[in-house]
Image: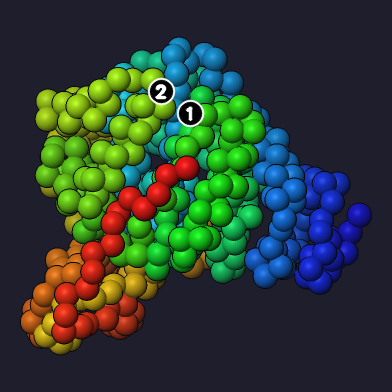
Amino acid sequence: MRMYDIILKKRNGGKLTKEEINFFVKGVTDKTIELYHISALMMAIYFQGMDEEETLNLTLAMSDSGERMNLEKIEGIKVDKHSTGGVGDKTTLAVVPIVAACGVKVAKMSGRGLGHTGGTIDKLESIEGFQTSVEPEKFFQIVNTHGLCVAGQSMNLAPADKELYALRDVTATVENFSLIASSIMSKKLASGSDCILLDVKVGSGAFMKTYDDAEKLAQAMVKIGNGAGRKTVAVITDMDKPLGNAIGNSIEVIEAIETLKGNGPEDFTLLTKTLSSDLLKMAGIDNAEEKVEEVISNGKALRKLADMVKAQGGNENYVYDTSLFPKAEFTYKIRAEKDGFISHMNAESVGIACAKLGAGREKKGDSIDFTAGIKLLRKTGDKVSAGEVIAEMYSSDESKFTDAEKTFNSSITYSETKPEKINLILGKL
Ligand code: URA
């Protein structure tokens, strides 16, 4: 079999056989296929798509490309959540400790930033000492002792996805329905939890821009999950504007910590509570909503996050005193260009502006600036006056502000009338 023929077939709209997909995934895993061949096939799939059978075969081949985690060493029901990716989406950082504080174990594998979206692993690494690379035995021990662990894709789980994920990030081949479904579900199947909650994002800051596409992606993933014997539920949520007010790495962790203290922004708090109670219900817990409120107000959820940080080698004092997070060297204020309402804020452009400040990667393996980011002081629906400060940008490199400000300003549409509010929770399958 030759990669050239596989690329040509897909480029011309053909259907790849199971053998061709297995050949490709094996070559990606053992690194015998050139990066230019992989990138070319990703681009061909991006344009031509894959049908249901090809998507399933790609998912299974990727989930079999490494070890499969056997979570039997962890007692009780194990739950997992995964977002399809968004801007300001720090939900895992708040949901995982809440669920664990309610007594349900979360054994979670998370990713790095992808395209214009941030990644939980990058965010967690902004905490001094925090280790995202955790060996399986340690992972089991941490989940058994503390009820939660969030690790990177280091345990040889779905290594083919790890390679493809990093390449897609820098070759503009993320936003394809089959590539996203197979990427997420290969990891979820390999990581072995009993219940999987998928947060499928829709809107300008999501990879799926329309509700129909998000629903199609959600249906495909739920079918793959349930077909593999996992209880799988998908929630479709709005990502037309950034989630919460902080976008970046360390500033998102701080916002998640504030939310665990009960001081989070309204939208992010609502999503955190909804996903947390959905996970608890999937695990068979009664009065889920009340339990979520309780562990936030009695500080148990915050302590769970601190326990996890400590168990993963991090400085847990960061959780109790967020002034310990290093600050960006430079700050820049963005002012409203006009009087009126912010009628739309294109979340993808805000994510790109943030990456330009240093919070994302341009090339595979680039390091990132944990302190870089954007704090929104005004959001969609707010009335503003020309010259009023609507956002602050942070970076370790002052020269990055000009371009990032241009991109940020291009994300905003002003109107004379107040725009209609979009609900945050749009659907559930
Ligand atoms: N999250 C993933 O893990 N993979 C994708 O392709 C998109 C979001």
Q: Which quadrant of the structure image shows residue 399? A: bottom left
Q: Is residue 248 left or right of residue 18?
A: left
Which residue is label 1 attached to? 195
Q: Amino acid at mark 1?
A: Cys
**Which residue is located at x 39 percent, y 57 percent?**
86
User: Residue 398's x, y, as percent?
Assistant: 25, 75
Provide residue 26's location: percent of width, then percent of height: 77, 45
Image mark for residue 283: 2
Residue drawn 45% across and 33% down? 80
Looking at the picture, tell me which residue is in the foreground, 332 or 92.
Answer: 92
Q: Residues within 10 Å of mark 1 (few under 14, many from 20)?
A: many
At 28% from the left and 46% from the top, the residue drawn is: 271
Type of residue at label 2?
Ala
Q: Mark 1: is the Cβ under 8 angstroms from ligand 1? A: no
**Quick one: 44 or 271, which is closer to the camera?**
271
Q: Residues within 10 Å of mark 2 (few under 14, many from 20)?
A: many
Which of the two residues, 193 or 418, is positioned nearer the viewer here? 418
- Vertically, is 63 above or below 401? above
Element class at badge 2? loop
On screen, 429 above or below 210?
above
Question: Does 414 sit above or below residue 242?
Answer: below
Do the residues bearing badges 1 and 2 touch, measured as CB atoms within 8 Å? yes
Quadrant occupied by the N terminus: bottom right
Callout 1: SS: strand
Residue 131 falls left or right of residue 392: right
Left or right position of 421 against 203: left
Marker count (numbered): 2
Q: Which numbered tag is attached to residue 235? A: none
Sequence-first tag of 1 and 2 = 1
State how far apart marks 1 and 2 are (Cα). Answer: 7 Å
Residue 376 appears in the figure: yes
Which residue lies most toward the right here?
A: 1
